[in-house]
Amino acid sequence: MTLSEKAYNALRQDIIRGALGQGKPLRMAELSARYDMGFSPLREALNRLQSERLVVAEALRGFKVASLSMAEMRDAIETRILVETAALRAAILRGDDDWAAGIVAALYALKLQVERRDTEADIWELEARHYAFHRALLAACGSAWQLEFFDRLYAATERYRIPILLNRAGGQGRDIQGEHAALAEATLARDADLATDLLRQHYQRSAEIIGRSMQAEFAM
Amino acid sequence: MTLSEKAYNALRQDIIRGALGQGKPLRMAELSARYDMGFSPLREALNRLQSERLVVAEALRGFKVASLSMAEMRDAIETRILVETAALRAAILRGDDDWAAGIVAALYALKLQVERRDTEADIWELEARHYAFHRALLAACGSAWQLEFFDRLYAATERYRIPILLNRAGGQGRDIQGEHAALAEATLARDADLATDLLRQHYQRSAEIIGRSMQAEFAM
DNA sequence: GCAAGCACAATTTTCGAAAATAATCGAATT
DNA sequence: AATTCGATTATTTTCGAAAATTGTGCTTGC
């Protein structure tokens, strides 16, 4: 793997997980020290992240971490609903046994990690399996574009979910794993109307919880 | 404007317009000579274009222009229908007088250019106004994400439309400007069902024409 | 006291060369 | 004849320094 790719992976992770702070300028000298590499691979990675809206660039004034806002969060989640309900419908139509088995496996792996969330590493593993589950639902949709947009929007919304995951603050009394199980069940039963409905509700609840937590924490 | 940005604009245009040939490797030395700049700004631009799926990168083996295929074209157009019908509905709900006036202006400017398509520069101007018209329809949708996806998908499908535009080969007997006018009319009348229906048909016809032309030319 | 101008410092951007890797070609071997 | 190996060439990737630009703080003039 080239340094450019390593820089991309590391920066992307650090931005999504909040380690670099939203809106903060990214100084080349600091990044070079932090990731132990020269400017070239860092600038290449920052250019990729700029296209993915995780980083904002201004000519001759460098890069900064993209800012978070209530409006952007709502937009990202609404667009997720649009893209993912369509992709889920297509997957339900086209999915084969491998697709179905992948959902069962991802749901089970997610369940195991939900019960084991002690260290911070557990949280990251939980997050990885959460992504993998939602990805597995759509895997058979047949549209590379929709899967890419899913990835982009997942990363965008992950930035808002992670502070809540780390604080263990949000989702009081919410049975997320139950929602996941019901969603998987409806999908495997090929009930597209029910599955897309559950998916929509799942995300609308997330948006509400994130919204409340943002109002509390940042007064946005 | 920095060299990086110039490189991005120039490469993006040359890829979309087909000047660099689909699937062809992009050698740094050649690009450096062609655009008269060093490797750094070129590599930064190529990294951005990689994120936009106009360029494909393989570690230590450089960059190449993304390939075209029938399947990708169909996927891009289907996803355009998904995103744009939703954005158009939202714009019809939320659009104000400026939005409506923008559509009228863009349609008129497009009409003027349709009647004047002699030189190649005319074709590029036509293409710019075509983009501006479709963009104007969605401008008031309120979703930055959906507008970005529109841009991405427009660029992706433009690559397929341009050979047809240049050959004057496609769309025999198709009244594209009539379709645009009807679409604008339904939109301005705030008839969301009719407008999204016309938009869908507009793109499905494009997909058919592009599909026939690709089968004829490349035997794909 | 305060704005304008100017040197100085900090920072980004770009270049040219070096390092690292991949591709090519021919000779030696089986 | 086909294949492997090694040397050579071509190419990508990375670095370190130079160039260009922006930001800062101080002086000067009013």
Image (cartoon, coloured by chain):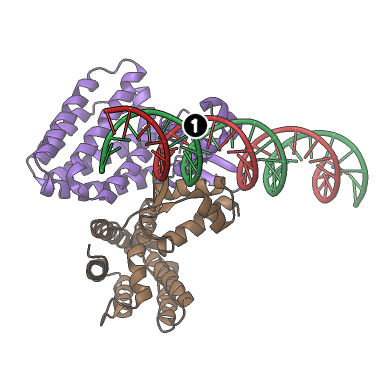
Chain colours: A brown, B purple, C green, D red
Q: Chain of mark 1?
A: B
Classify residue B155 as left or right of residue B90. right
Q: Residue at x 41, y 84 (%)?
A: A115
Most distant residue in the bottom direction: A115
x, y percentage for residue A191? Answer: 26, 70
Quarter location, residue A152:
bottom left
Query: What residue is rendered at 33% in x and 24% in y?
Result: B124
B197 relative to B164 in the view: left or right: left
Position of the N terminus of chain A by quadrant: bottom right
Which quadrant of the structure image shows residue A16? bottom left
Give the crowd class for mark 1: few <14, some 14-19, many >=20 residues within 10 Å: some
SS class, disc 1: loop
Residue type, mark 1 in image: Gly
Q: Which quarter of the rendered picture does the C terminus of chain A lie within?
A: bottom left
Query: Residue B47: percent from the left, percent from the top?
Result: 49, 44
A114 over B11 or under it: above or below? below
Out of B201 and B67, give the one closest to the viewer. B67
Rendered view: B167 above or below C9: above
Front-lying residue, A68 or B220: A68
Q: Position of residue B151 (x, y in %)?
A: 32, 42
From where the camera sits, is residue B216 visible? Answer: yes
Q: How many marks?
A: 1
**Label 1: which residue?**
B21
Instruction: Answer whether residue B23 is visible to the viewer in this image.
Output: no
Q: Which residue is pictured at 31% across the width and 58% down the height?
A: A68
Instruction: Name the spot of residue A50 as percent of width and height, x first.
Output: 41, 47
* B5 relative to A29 in the view: left or right: left
